[in-house]
Image (cartoon, helix red, strand yellow):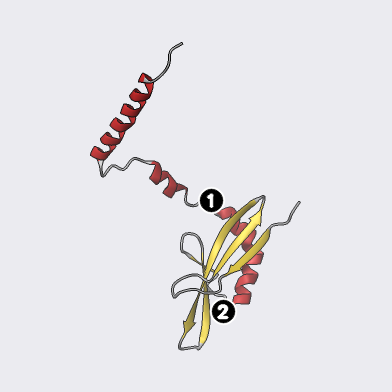
C-alpha cells in the first residue's frame, strides 16, 4: 500500500495576487488540492510573507513565518486536511450549470420546439418492414 504523500507544485512566474504554489495531497488513488500559497513582500520588515489559503479562500497556518515551516505543517497535517475537503468542491457550481436558465424562458421554449421538431422529423423518416 502506498503511503499518502504531500506534493508541492511551485510555479516559475506569477502575477501580483496569484498563487505561486499549489499543495496537493495524494492518497487512495485521489489527488486533492488542499491549499494554494501566496507570497507578499512586507516593505516594513523587508521580508517575504507566505500566506496559505484553502479551497474556500480561508487562511491556513497564520502563525508560520517562513516557507520551510509552512511546508512542514502541510506534510504533518496534509492527510487530515484532505479528509476535510469534499470529493468535488465544485459540485454545487456544476449542479447550478445543469439547471435551466430561468432568465430566458422564451429561449427555453424555442429550444424545446426545435428539439421536438427534429425528433418528429426523424420519426417520419423511419422505414417500416
Indicate left or right for 96 with 62 as reference.
Answer: left
Residue 116, quarter of the rendered image: top left
Please name the residue that numbered disc 2 is placed on: 65
In-front residue for pair 95/58: 95
Using the numbered discs, state the Cα–Cα distance from disc 1 to disc 2 in whole angstroms. Answer: 29 Å
122 sits to left or right of 25: left
Residue, far top: 129
Seen from the viewer's position, the closer of residues 60 and 121 is 121
Q: In percent of the image, x 33 and y 31: which residue is there?
A: 115
Give residue 121's position: percent from left, percent from top: 34, 24
Measured from the top left, where is residue 11 in percent x and y? 56, 71
Residue 119: x %, y % from top left: 36, 26
Residue at 34% from the left image edge and 28% from the top image edge: 118
For label 1, the crowd category at 10 Å Cα-Cα, with few meaning under 14, some 14 to 19 and many 20 or more, is few
Q: Which numbered disc, 1 or 2, marks the residue that appears first in the sequence?
A: 2
Q: Are marks 1 and 2 in contact (CB under 8 Å)?
A: no
| Mark 1, residue position | 86
Element on which disc 2 rests: loop
Amino acid at each position: 500500500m502506498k503511503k499518502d504523500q504531500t506534493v508541492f507544485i511551485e510555479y516559475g512566474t506569477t502575477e501580483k495576487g496569484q498563487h505561486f504554489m499549489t499543495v496537493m495531497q495524494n492518497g487512495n488513488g485521489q489527488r486533492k488540492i488542499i491549499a494554494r500559497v501566496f507570497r507578499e513582500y512586507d516593505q516594513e520588515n523587508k521580508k517575504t510573507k507566505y500566506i496559505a489559503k484553502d479551497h474556500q479562500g480561508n487562511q491556513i497556518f497564520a502563525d508560520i513565518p517562513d516557507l520551510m515551516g509552512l511546508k512542514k505543517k502541510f506534510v504533518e497535517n496534509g492527510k487530515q486536511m484532505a479528509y476535510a475537503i469534499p470529493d468535488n468542491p465544485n459540485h454545487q457550481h456544476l449542479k447550478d450549470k445543469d439547471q435551466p436558465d430561468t432568465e430566458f424562458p422564451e429561449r427555453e421554449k424555442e429550444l424545446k420546439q426545435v428539439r421536438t421538431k427534429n425528433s418528429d422529423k426523424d420519426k417520419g423518416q423511419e422505414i417500416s418492414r
